[in-house]
Amino acid sequence: LGLLSPRFGSPRGGVPPVLPDGTPGYAELWRAALLPNCPRLLPAPHSAAWGSRARWVTPRGEPDLGALHRDFGDAVVPVADCAEREYNSNPKKQMPMREFLSYWQETMSQDHSSSPRPCLYLKDWHMCKEFPDYDAYSTPECFSSDWLNEYWDAVHSDDYRFVYMGPRGSWTPFHADVFRSYSWSANVCGRKLWLLYPPGQEEALRDHLGNLPYDVTAPDPWPQDAPAKKQRGQKPMEVIQEAGEIIFIPSGWHHQVHNLEDTISINHNWLNGCNIDLVWSFLQSELRAVQKEIGHCRSGMSNWAEQCQCIMKACTGINYVEFYSFMKLIAERRMEFLHESEAGEHGELTRLGNWHAAFDLMRVQEVLVALQGDSDFGLLPVDSLPKRPEQLQMDIEHVIGNMGRMP
């Protein structure tokens, strides 16, 4: 099926690929997008049957604010002020959904031009977590191998499934996604402009202090820097995403997003065996940044390694030990799946079955070897872990070794 072939293409550099407009199958999308880390735009039929596209959209293709009020009016949602800057993002506050919808209705009735209120954007709303029985959508099959949400669902602490709602003119500043994960984003209604930069191109956008811009469309994002510096960056790939379409954003691609119309979108951050190595590389770079930032304190700290991990967790959302626990859970689930398959119990991981589970295990094994060889991981108290990394590695090797005897 081609899933065990090495990564082809480069996640860094080169001319950004043209986004195909076909309807790819599961294995085709892995080969064409996930493994080479290339963007993809899926056409509207992929979301045509979703409940949200039927219930949240008027016959004119606009957000149905009345329906949203009936279904979610009592919910409390995170709302960003697009006119305010807090570091390199927009600050958010909690607001009743009915209040946000009232603002949105006022903005729409005034044609978005004369409202005295700032531009507000409902974003990062964990709708699935708050309304688990609400039938808004189903994850596209080609994105169904989602280790990130599989893990967080299992430990019952969080998820990376979001709903965004905003008027024309709302936007998200320049950034790359959490953990350098993949993301997919579906327009329930409306249109978005995506400005995409392949990994590495963002380096030319940094100022003399190493900071990335807040808004890459600003006429002079770094007025204090020399013109020669500002001219080095390549222009982004520009993608217009229409209603119903689903865009795949690869690992490490910095991007900025603008709503060209009143828009509702559904977004997932996710990762799997195709990009777990890129996530591991990102975590290593995050730890190095922490070590550099507090390096002057090292001589006075008896627990230097653990303190760096605590700071990394606070800044990044995960540290090395939790990353190991994450890989352990995925590996144990895949080994259990293969054991049940051997016993004739044919549960379904994905429609690719045993070989997909084996691919996942092989990818975990590769990163697990790298993790054990990392000198910073070796300084951590791993003896208290439920299963030591070397034992997990042996378990994986045993299961993969038995694959040749599977039916």
Image: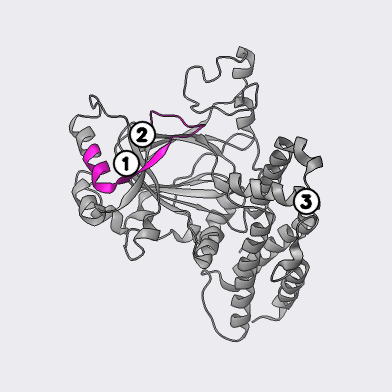
How crowded pointer 3 is (Cα within 10 Å; few <14, some 14-19, many 20+) is rated as some
Q: Is residue 316 left or right of residue 83?
A: right
Q: Is residue 35 left or right of residue 150?
A: right
Q: Identify the element where label 1 is drawn.
A: strand
The answer to whether residue 198 of the structure is visible from this angle is yes
Q: Which residue is mark 1?
A: 263
**Residue at the limit of the structure toward the front, as seen here:** 300
Pointers 1 and 2 in contact (C-beta within 8 Å): yes
Say which of 342 and 158 sits in front.
Answer: 158
Of mark 1 and mark 2, the one earlier in the sequence is 2
Residue shown at 24% from the left, 55% from the top: 55
Q: Amino acid at mark 2?
A: Ser
Mark 1 and mark 3: Cα distance apart in space? 44 Å
Q: Which residue is mark 2?
A: 170
Q: Quadrant of residue 380?
A: bottom right
State the quadrant of the N terminus. bottom right
Q: Amino acid at mark 3?
A: Asp
Q: Nearer the viewer, mark 1 or mark 2?
A: 2
What residue span does the magenta drawing correspond to?
81-103
Of mark 1 and mark 3, the one earlier in the sequence is 1
